[in-house]
Image (cartoon, helix red, strand yellow):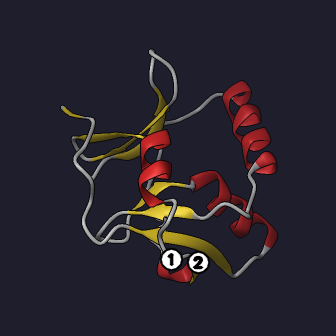
């Protein structure tokens, strides 16, 4: 399953799971009142591969990981896949943090669009 977050040309980040795309801003708004759980990192699927990136892109990614705020929960879909929060997960993995704050949809919201 293809999973990624990208920037929408019209502005704002988009989250993609397979052929479904959601606005990250919308996911945050829809999940703002969800119960926040503390999830062990070893319960998350962190085995996804990403396309090759060059050194400049890697440096930008590293800055984003360093700037990630662990006070904000990651957002999981109904199956436990990460919809938002990969930089926070990488930060926890890099610094040896065993758990992360998370919210989870019981039923995924309708995507903003599909491929």
Image quadrant where residue 56 sits: top right
Which of the two discs, 1 and 2, sits closer to the camera? 1
Horizontal and vertical percent position of residue 63 = 79, 39
Compared to residue 103, the image places residue 62 above or below, namely: above
Badge 2 density bin: few <14, some 14–19, many ≥20, Cα 10 Å: some
- What SS does tag 2 mark? helix
Viewer-side residue, 18 vs 9: 9
Which residue shows up at 44% across the image and 23% down it? 8
Q: Residue at x 69, y 39 (%)?
A: 61
Residue reaching furthest to the left: 115
The structure residue drawn at horizontal position 49% and vertical position 40%, both measured from the top left corner, is: 25
Q: How far is disc 1 from disc 2 in space, using C-alphas?
A: 18 Å
Q: Earlier in the sequence, mark 1 or mark 2?
A: 1
Provide residue 105's location: percent of width, then percent of height: 35, 67
Secondary structure at badge 1 equals loop
Q: How many marks?
A: 2
Disc 1 target residue: 35
Relative horizontal placement of residue 89, taking residue 7 as reference (left or right): right
The local crowd at label 1, few if under 14, some if 14 to 19, many if 20 or more residues have their Cα within 10 Å, is: few
Q: Which residue of the protein is positioned furthest toward the top in this rendering?
A: 10
Choose between 90 and 58: the one closer to the eye: 90
Residue 37: percent from the left, percent from the top? Answer: 55, 81
- The answer to whether 19 appears left or right of 52 in the picture is left
Q: Tell which residue pokes out farthest to the front in this image.
A: 33
In the picture, measured across the screen, residue 8 lies left or right of residue 73, that is left
Q: Residue at x 75, y 55 (%)?
A: 69
Q: Quadrant of residue 98?
A: bottom right
Picture coordinates of residue 71, whole percent (x, y): 73, 64
Q: Which residue is mark 2?
A: 41
Specify the quadrant that holds the C terminus: top left
């Amino acid at each position: 399953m293809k999973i990624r977050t990208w920037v929408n040309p019209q502005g704002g980040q988009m989250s993609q799971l397979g052929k479904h795309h959601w606005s990250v801003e919308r996911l945050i708004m829809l999940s703002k009142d969800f119960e926040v759980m503390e999830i062990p990192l070893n319960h998350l699927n962190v085995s996804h591969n990403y396309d090759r990136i060059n050194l400049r892109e890697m440096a930008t990614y590293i800055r984003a990981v360093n700037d990630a705020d662990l006070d904000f929960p990651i957002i999981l879909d109904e199956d436990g896949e990460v919809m938002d929060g990969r930089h926070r997960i990488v930060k926890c993995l890099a610094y040896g943090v065993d758990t992360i704050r998370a919210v989870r949809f019981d039923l995924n919201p309708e995507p903003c669009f599909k491929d």
